[in-house]
Amino acid sequence: GLIRTKNFGAKKATAPVLMFMEGHCIVNRLWLEPLLQRLLRDPRALVMPALDYIPQTAWGEYHQGVPTMWRYEWNMNLIHTNPGNIIKFERTKPYESPGTSGGIFVMMRSWFEELEFFDEGMMEWGGDHAELSFKTWRCGGRIEVVPCSRIGHLFRDPEHRPYPVDVNRVVKNYDRLAQIWWKDHYSYFRRMKPESEGMKHKGLEKVQESYANLQKKLNCKDHQWYMENVDFEMNWEKDRLCHPHWGPGHPDHCKNALSHGKFTVAQGDDMPPKLYLQVLRKALAEKRNRGPTRNATDEL
C-alpha cells in the first residue's frame, strides 16, 4: 500500500532532503527554492508549499488556492482552517500549520529517520499524514506552509478517484493511530468514530512500545500539549462535539446543521475568531518568553 511504499522510498533515498509529491500535481515557477531555504533555517521542519487548485475535470486549468492551514477533527478527518481569515491572500511569509496533507512536502531525511518512519501496521491508504503531523510537532519539530512555493493539486472527489478506497480500512488505520497518539483522549475519537468499536490491530503492542521509546529519546509531548500550543480549535471543539448520524435524545446529537467544512461540530459551536486570536497571541508570547526560537515564523 501507499504507506509502506513511502517508507520504502525514504529508506532507498541517498540525498539529504526527501521530497514527497503526488502524481496529480503541476509545479509552479521557482517552487523548490523557498522550501529548501526553510529547511536550511530549521532542519526539523516539515515544509509544505501553498496548494493551488486544478479542477478534477480540467487538467489544463490552474487557479490560485485559498490561504489555509491543515488540521484534524476528532474523527481524524483532515480539514482546512483559517479562523478569522488571519492568513491573507497576499501573505508571503511562511506560517505554521497544525497538520500536513501528507502528500506534498519536503523534510530532511535524517529527521524523518529519527522520527522512525511510518507505522507499517497501517495498511493501504489513510493515516500516514496524521501520524507524521503528531510526530513532527510533539517530538520537537514544526510544520510550515510557504506561500512563495506554489504547486497545483488536482483535488478529486471519491467518484473521480482512479482507485477504490476501503473506508473501513481507513477507519481502522485512524483507530490504530488514536490508540497511540490520542491515548489520553481516545474516548473522544470513539464517540466520533463509533464504527471503530471492536477493531483489532496486529502488532499494536510493539508500536506502542516503540512510541514510548521515541517519547523518551526525543522528549515527545502529549496530546494535551499539542492542543494547548498548536491546534487551539481542537481543544475548543472537544467539549462541543456532535455526530451527524445520531438522532434527538443522544448526547452527541447535532442540534444544528454541521459547521461549514466540518463533520464533528455544529454551526454556532466553532471557536470564535476573536478568542482564537487571543489564545494564539498568548501562546506566541509564552514561546518568546522561553527564549529564542529556531526561526522567524512565530508571528501572526
Image (spheres, rainbow, N blue to C red):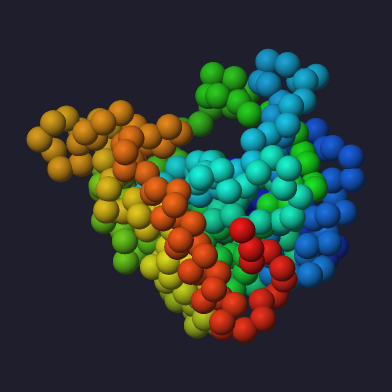
Q: Position of residue 30 (x, y in %)?
A: 89, 45
Determine the image quadrant of residue 275: bottom left
| Residue 78 vertical placement versus 280 (above, below) | above
Q: Where is residue 174 in the image (x, y as percent from the top left)?
A: 42, 49
Q: Is 265 or 210 nearer to us in this picture?
A: 265
Taking the spot 28% from the left edge, 46% from the top edge, the residue there is 241
Taking the spot 57% from the left edge, 58% from the top edge, the residue there is 132
Quadrant into which the N terminus falls: top right
Residue 200 shows up from this direction:
no
Q: Is residue 99 left or right of residue 92?
A: left
| Residue 170 vertical placement versus 39 (above, below) | above
Determine the image quadrant of residue 10: bottom right
Quadrant into which the C terminus falls: bottom right
Q: Is 158 or 257 nearer to us in this picture?
A: 257
Q: Is 99 or 219 nearer to us in this picture?
A: 99
Q: Where is residue 220 in the image (x, y as percent from the top left)?
A: 50, 75
Q: Where is residue 251 in the image (x, y as percent from the top left)?
A: 15, 43
Q: Is residue 236 left or right of residue 158?
A: left
Taking the spot 31% from the left edge, 61% from the top edge, the residue there is 185
Taking the spot 64% from the left edge, 63% from the top edge, the residue there is 299
Residue 166 shows up from this direction:
yes
